[in-house]
Amino acid sequence: MRRIEPANQALKFCLVAICIIVLSITLSAGLWPFSFHQDNNVKWNVDRAGLHFGDHGMIVSRGKFEGLPTDASKGCTLELWVEPGLSSGSSTILSFYNPQSSTRAQLQQSSDDLEFTHALKPPYNRSNQQSVFLDHVLKKGQKILITLAYANGVLDVYLDGSLRKSTRSVELPCADFAGTLIVGNTPYKDASWTGIVYGLAFYDHGLRA
C-alpha cells in the first residue's frame, strides 16, 4: 500500500500545525467557558420573600446540626413552607448528611406526592425503610405548609394546618436532625428539587393542631 505524504518536510510540518490550530479552535468553541461543574441555581426572589431553586440548585448548611432532644414524650417537629416548581418529579426537598449515623431521614417529592422516608440501616432500600405518602398534594405554583410532628411514637402530618395523616408505623427520630442540612437535594444522588422555599423550622417538641 502506497503512503501519500507532502513533497517536503517543511510542508508536512505546516499541515500538522494547521491541523492542531483547527482542533484547538474547535475544542475551545465547544468547551467554552471551560466550566465542568453545574452552577448552583439558587437565588432570592426579586419581588417577594423566599428562595428559588432551579435545576441543580441546593443549599448546604455552613455548620453542622447536633440533633434535637430525644425525649420521647416531647418529640420534635419539622415544618416546611414550599411552592413546587413542577407538578411531577422525583426529587428530594430536604435531607441531612451525617456519616456517623446509620439512619437517614428525607422529605421528597415523588410525582405529585409528598413522601417522608426514614431508612433504618444499610442497604438503604425499600426493605430497610419506613415511608409515609400523601397523594397528589404537591401542585406546581401552589404554596403548601408541611408539618411533621412526632411525639409518643405517633407521626402526625399536617398540610396547611389540617391533619392529613397519623401513623405509628413511621418514626421521626429527633436525633436524625443532625449533620449537614441539605435543602433542595440529597447527598446520595442527584435528585434536585425545583420550586420556592418560603420557610423552614425545627421544634424540640411535637406541635399540636
Image (tube, helix red, strand yellow):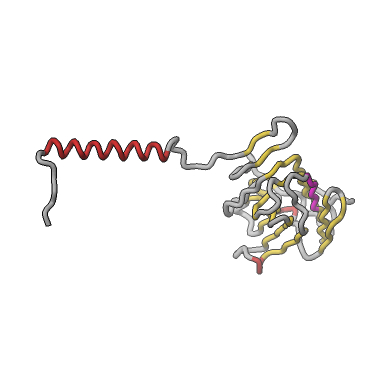
Q: Is residue 104 above or below residue 26?
A: below
Q: Viewed as shown, does residue 90 lie left or right of 47?
A: left
Between 60 and 175, the one lying in front of the other is 60
* Of residues 42 and 23, the one drawn nearer to the viewer in this rendering: 23
Q: Is residue 89 above or below residue 55?
A: below
Residue at the extreme bottom of the image, as rendered: 127
The quarter holding residue 58 reads: top right
The foreground one among 116 and 142 is 142
Relative side of 92 to 21, left or right: right
At 80% from the left and 46% from the top, the residue drawn is 145
Res. 60 visible in picture: no
| Residue 25 spot, x, y in % from top left | 34, 36
- Image location (x, y in percent) of residue 71: 80, 54
Total numbered labels: 0
Residue 30 in percent (x, y) is at: 41, 40
**Outermost residue toward the right?**
209
Question: Is 51 drawn above or below residue 84 in the view shown?
Answer: above
Q: Name the quadrant containing residue 165.
A: bottom right
Prevailing secondary structure of the magenta residues: strand
- Report the front residue among 13 and 116: 13
Q: Is residue 181 magenta?
A: no
Which range of residues does the magenta coloring cover? 143-148
Residue 4, can we see it? Answer: yes
Is residue 108 left or right of 38 when viewed as pictured? right
Residue positioned most to the top: 47
Picture quarter containing residue 1?
bottom left
Q: Position of residue 208 (x, y in %)?
A: 88, 51
